[in-house]
Image (cartoon, rainbow, N blue to C red):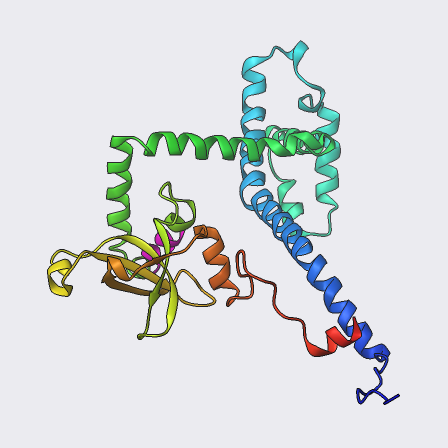
Amino acid sequence: MARSSLPPRSRPTFSKDFKRFFLRGLGILLPSVLTLWILVQAYFFLDARVAQPINRGVRSAVVWVVPRTFPKSLQPRWFVVTDDEVKTFRANLESHPDASQRALARQTDEALRADLRAFELRRFWDNHWYLRFIGLIIAVTLIYLAGRVLGGFLGRRAAGRVERFITRIPLFKQVYPHVKQLVDLVLGERSMAFKRVVMVQYPRQGIYSLGFVTGGALRGAAEAIGGEALTVFVPSTPTPFTGFTITILASEAIDMPISVDEAIRFVLTGGVLAPGGPSPPAAAGEVANG
């Protein structure tokens, strides 16, 4: 019996095996870890830059409202500051190693009493974790109300005037329009403004590119090219928000049976994530090693 001419299959080395499974685990875990990290960082940013300033304002308002709303018999414990507590607080400030803290000791008794009330309210606030979310709830409510007000006819006109004013300010006018376009593209009510996903021959005949139909063509384009025309946005990789706007005959656009989101993922990944298509072929080494 003739022997097989195929070479014996070699066992993978530890380094190759480790690299293969390490990259496989990284590919599985990294999207979830990155998503969680982005959400946590977004929460910390909103908490530090939005919620905490609002919470400070709420605490200041509470300190102002309590003596004007509640009689002394019903005032909360953190608001009641005795004369002995004021004297102790002043003595601690006078002995503080920081000169700025020692300067605070020269305040009147009422000013020190107000500082103590604010400190006690802050300690009470921190001891009740759920109070930290008051700032976020107020911020969400204010954004919602702003959307209700600015979404009306008068609100849109007022917002338009503010935008026109901003676009006249140096430096702002170079940045603001691009930021607004990106925000409108992602969060606008007319999401993406893309109507259809098509394939077009671009940049030359025989090369097909993925594009998005954004609407009809410019006035006079149909007469110029001799038929019904379409405006197509051809995105670039890996930034699908930039690209080229072209005008083609409607008959030359080939409709694709995929959604706008799938098409954007395809462009964003350079074709690695092909919707509905076969998975990429495995490397020869991976096939041999199983």
**Along the line of sight, which residue is nearer the eye, 154 or 258?**
258
Across and down, in percent, residue 235 comes to 39, 63
Across and down, in percent, residue 64 comes to 54, 24
Residue 112, image quadrant:
top right
Image vertical order of residue 111 relative to residue 175, above or below: above
Residue 36 highlighted magenta (yes or no): no
Q: In this view, does 173 lie to the left or right of 128?
A: left
What secondary structure do most residues of the magenta stretch adopt? helix
- The quarter of the rendered structure image containing the N terminus is bottom right
Q: In this view, does 246 lie to the left or right of 256?
A: left
Image vertical order of residue 2 relative to residue 128, above or below: below
Across and down, in percent, residue 148 comes to 37, 30
The answer to whether one can see residue 50 in this image is yes
Image vertical order of residue 78 relative to residue 44, above or below: above
Residue at the spot x=43%, y=62% of the render? 240
Q: Tell me the magenta residue range.
A: 175-182
Residue at the spot x=53%, y=33% of the render? 57
**Along the line of sight, which residue is nearer the eye, 9 or 196?**
9
Q: In this view, does 17 lie to the left or right of 146?
A: right
- The quarter of the rendered structure image containing the C terminus is bottom right
**Along the line of sight, which residue is nearer the eye, 18 or 46?**
18
Residue at the spot x=27%, y=44% of the render? 162
